[in-house]
Image (cartoon, rainbow, N blue to C red):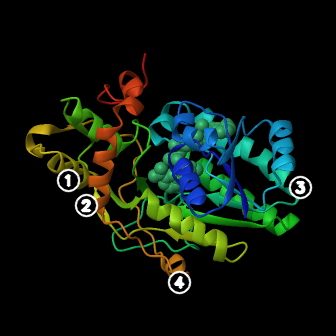
């Protein structure tokens, strides 16, 4: 099967590309290589002729349209996004541009060329959930940040294009991913790198925010399964059932790295509008036969090992993304 992966140089996208190649798919990647996308994530595959790469902006209708016509994918899988909640607090317009305006251009290309899309949404579209409530795929969208609102906005537009124009689509809504090649701006890599550098790990607010933690390879297997067995026009939540607070996860990382949390973890100001709890029902993906294979403990250990062995990968990003204690506060 020929698959075009949009955003395949980013964190989940590059892990997904690696997964597809290992399963024998013919793969192409289209990615603008913004600050978050790194060709290093897939260079070996591109240079080895296993993946065709085209650098380009999702808003470039002509370039992307021509690339789709040339590669002739049977399916497009879309990981492109401005993906960092911290950034969306200070620069919401970037999120509206990429996650809504450029995504609308993508819909027009798909409509014109009659190609199906598997779109990667997020659990954040369901917003803050009260204790004891788990969102299934029909739960109302109730986003809190400019990031999650932009993701929810596109989910609705995609549904409308399915209904109005017959566009073929699938949607997945994964929980918090972690693993190799995640940008150092995100919680777990930031924590590991700060501890490697001898800096204290930081937690936003009291750290009692509850999340489900999904190892990226488990997510990639789930997305491939939806590609193969998902029923058209459906949404699939993907969660590991590994619920833990931010504080617990940061403490676990510290302990796995031989650092006493009471000494090595500090609290900084919380982000405005931050959701307290995300939680989903994931029966639908389990009915397709998927189970997470990597426990939180094991996934964290693997992630720590990867960052320790790949300092070349994160070192150039340290000054900008790791050293500040409260990165979501706008620089003056
Ligand atoms: P990422 O930020 O690591 O990667 C995004 C990729 O999109 C990068 O390669 C970047 O270069 C590319 N990109 C951004 N703007 C572009 C544009 N205008 N044109 C072309 N390419 C552009 O993100 P990620 O963490 O890998 O997330 C991938 C997808 O999964 C996103 O849609 C995100 O919303 C969703 N998601 C992420 C998580 C998570 O925990 N990371 C959880 C649930 C859902």
Mark 2, ligand 1, within 8 Å: the answer is: no
Q: Residues under labels 2 and 3: Cα distance?
A: 45 Å
Residue linked to disc 1: 252
Residue linked to disc 2: 297
Location of residue 266 in the rendering, given as x and y in whole percent from the top left corner: 18, 37
Residue linked to disc 4: 287
* Mark 3 residue crowding within 10 angstroms, few (<14) / some (14–19) / many (20+): few
**Is residue 12 shown above or below 311?**
below
Residue linked to disc 3: 113
Specify the quadrant that holds the N terminus: bottom right
**Is residue 161 shown above or below 17?**
below
Residue furthest to the top in view is: 332
Mark 3, ligand 1, within 8 Å: the answer is: no
Q: Of the residues under marks 4 and 1, which one precedes in the sequence?
A: 1
Can residue 138 be seen?
Answer: yes
Helix, strand or loop for disc 3: helix
Helix, strand or loop for disc 2: helix
Helix, strand or loop for disc 4: helix
Location of residue 257 in the rendering, given as x and y in whole percent from the top left corner: 17, 45
Mark 4, ligand 1, within 8 Å: the answer is: no
In the rendered structure, the answer to whether residue 140 lies left or right of residue 240 reads right
Q: Dividing the image into four equal quarters, which quarter contains ligand 1? A: top right
Location of residue 332 in the rendering, given as x and y in whole percent from the top left corner: 43, 15
Instruction: Tell me if label 1 and label 2 are in contact, CB under 8 Å.
Output: yes
Q: Nearer the viewer, residue 319 or 128?
A: 319
Q: Residues under labels 4 and 1: Cα distance?
A: 31 Å
């Amino acid at each position: 099967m020929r698959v075009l992966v949009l955003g395949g140089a980013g964190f989940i996208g590059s892990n997904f590309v690696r997964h597809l190649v290992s399963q024998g798919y013919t793969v192409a990647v289209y990615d603008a290589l913004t600050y978050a996308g790194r060709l290093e994530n897939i260079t070996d595959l591109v240079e080895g002729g296993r993946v065709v790469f085209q650098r380009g902006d999702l808003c470039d209708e002509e370039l992307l349209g021509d690339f789709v016509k040339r590669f002739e994918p049977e399916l497009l899988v879309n990981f492109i996004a401005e993906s960092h909640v911290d950034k969306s607090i200070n620069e919401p317009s970037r999120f509206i541009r990429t996650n809504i305006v450029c995504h609308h251009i993508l819909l027009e290309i798909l409509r014109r060329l009659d190609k199906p899309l598997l779109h990667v949404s997020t659990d954040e579209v369901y917003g803050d959930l009260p204790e004891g409530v788990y969102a299934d795929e029909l739960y109302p969208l109730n986003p809190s940040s400019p990031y999650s609102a932009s993701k929810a906005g596109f989910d609705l537009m995609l549904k409308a294009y399915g209904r109005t124009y017959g566009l073929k689509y699938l949607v997945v809504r994964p929980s918090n991913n972690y693993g190799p090649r995640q940008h150092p701006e995100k919680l777990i890599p930031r924590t590991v790198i700060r501890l490697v550098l001898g800096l204290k790990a930081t937690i936003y607010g009291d750290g009692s925010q509850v999340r489900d933690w999904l190892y990226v390879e488990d997510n990639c297997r789930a997305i491939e399964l939806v590609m193969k067995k998902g029923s058209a026009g459906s949404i699939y939540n993907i969660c590991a059932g590994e619920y833990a607070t931010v504080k617990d996860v940061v403490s676990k990382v510290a302990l796995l790295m031989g650092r006493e949390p009471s000494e090595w973890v500090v609290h900084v100001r919380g982000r405005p509008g931050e959701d307290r709890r995300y939680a989903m029902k994931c029966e639908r993906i389990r009915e397709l036969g998927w189970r997470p294979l990597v426990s939180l403990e094991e996934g964290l250990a693997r992630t720590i090992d990867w960052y320790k062995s790949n300092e070349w990968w994160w070192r150039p990003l340290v000054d900008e993304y790791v050293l500040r204690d409260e990165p979501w506060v706008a620089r003056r």
